Amino acid sequence: MSTTQSTAGTLATAAAGLFAGSALFISAVEQPALLEVDPSGKLAAQRFGAMYKRAAPLQGALALVGSAAAITAAAQGGHCSRVLWGGSGALLLSVWPYTLLAMMPTNKKLINKEGSEEERAELAQKWGRLHLYRTAAGLASFTAMALALARLEHKSG
């Protein structure tokens, strides 16, 4: 194990963990709480723009940093390391095209407050379902990175 691989792996795992945690919070706490307070989804639609402008830069940066660091760790290791680090980095990076292609039309409609209040409420509920991919990808990539990091530590110990 190289110092570069260890450092990159630690950074990748930390970034993926933060991404997964924030995505899980949104999917398991924030979105359901807004829908519980207002089951119609109107409140969630109303607050979407304010939440999005804070979460998007943070989650976007975490996904990019985690992916780049994981790919760096993959380049420094053997076959198993390449598979774990490379695969988990690619999975974390997949949230970018997914967000741009699958979620952005919904995001834009919510941000721009397009449609009636009822239509925006339906969009807010749809957005919550779409966001589940980001949560699952974040959790899976973090788990794989934690496993890869544990393998590195085990080999060096």
Image (spheres, rainbow, N blue to C red):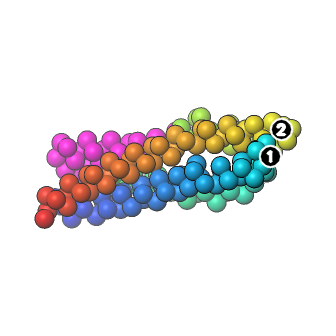
Q: Which residue type does callout 2 highlight?
A: Glu
Q: Is residue 78 visible?
A: yes
Q: Residue at x 71, y 50 (%)?
A: 36
Residue 104 versus residue 53 in the image, above or below: above
The kind of secondary structure element at disc 2 is: helix
Image quarter of the C terminus: bottom left
- The image shows residue 138 at horizontal and vertical percentages of 45, 48
| Disc with the residue nearer the chain's start (1 vs 2) | 1
Where residue 25 sits, quadrant-wise, is bottom right
Q: Which mark is residue 118?
A: 2
Q: Which residue type does callout 1 highlight?
A: Lys
- The image shows residue 10 at horizontal and vertical percentages of 31, 62
Q: Which residue in the protein does label 1 denote?
A: 42
Q: Nearer the viewer, residue 155 or 108?
A: 155
The kind of secondary structure element at disc 1 is: helix
Residues drawn in magenta: 71-97
The mark tally for this picture is 2
Magenta span main SS: helix
Q: Residue at x 27, y 45 (%)?
A: 84
Q: Is residue 89 visible?
A: no
- The image shows residue 70 at horizontal and vertical percentages of 33, 52
Does 130 sit left or right of 88 as displayed?
right
Where residue 129 sits, quadrant-wise, is top right
Image quarter of the N terminus: bottom left
Outermost residue, right direction?
116
